[in-house]
Image (tube, rainbow, N blue to C red):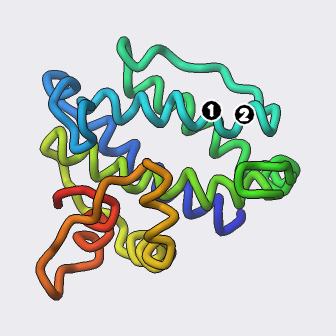
Amino acid sequence: MSEPADRYRKVAAAFTERVRAVPADRWDAPAPCEGWVARDVVRHLVEWLPALFFPTWDIEWSPGPSVDEDPVGAWVALDRTIQAALDDPDVAGSERETRMGRSSFAATVDTICTGDVLIHTWDLARATGLDEGLDPDEVHGMLVGVEPMDEVLRSSGHYGPRVDVAEGADEQTRLLAFLGRHP
């Protein structure tokens, strides 16, 4: 196993746990991302990640059910595909040209996907009243990684303005606020 595969496995397992725990009547609850409901958090990952990875790496993927019909099944199908690719040394180590330059599949998942799944775990939990706690080691690593890239991240349009938090706030609160969430 590689470190990126293990990190993804840990973060995705927490997201899967939340997805499976969403009460049936909460899928249309407002999410922290403006204009989204809980189901849209899953939809974002299920639609965005395959478009990012699979054409570049020619990974075979059999999409699960639609997010509208079965958000749990849609996420589980994608998660299994990503994890299988990470666990295959030939795929995980294969390099391609990406938006970030030349990168392996594992490094690309580690740089883009794992953090996105981590933050969207909080979004889904917040929308549905589930446990909002995130893995503290992953939170720390992401916070340390993103803070120096403040200007670049803001200019991408993917993050809202930084939210002010109390001095001495814990790292999860600081990370979420950095990314424009209101923890």
Q: Nearer the viewer, residue 176 or 81?
A: 176
Q: How many labels does the image show?
A: 2
Q: Mark 1: which amino acid?
A: Pro
Q: For the point 22% across and 44% down, which residue is it? A: 32
Mark 1 Cα-neighbour bin, 10 Å: few <14, some 14–19, many ≥20:
some
Q: Mark 2 points at which residue?
A: 54
Residue to which mark 1 is pinned: 50
Q: Position of residue 90 (x, y in %)?
A: 88, 50
- Mark drawn on residue 117: none
Q: Which amino acid does label 2 sit on?
A: Phe
Residue depicted at x 72% and y 33%: 54
- Where is residue 36, by image quadrant? top left
**Which residue is found at the position 50% from the left and 52% from the top?**
156
Up the image or down, 55 lies above or below 136; here it is above
Residue 122 relative to residue 6: left or right: left
**Is residue 121 shown above or below 136?**
above
Structural distance between the alpha carbons of marks 1 and 2: 5 Å
Instruction: Indicate left or right for 90 with 171 as reference.
Output: right
Residue nearest the viewer, comparing 43 with 177:
177
Q: Where is residue 66 in the image (x, y as percent from the top left)?
A: 45, 15
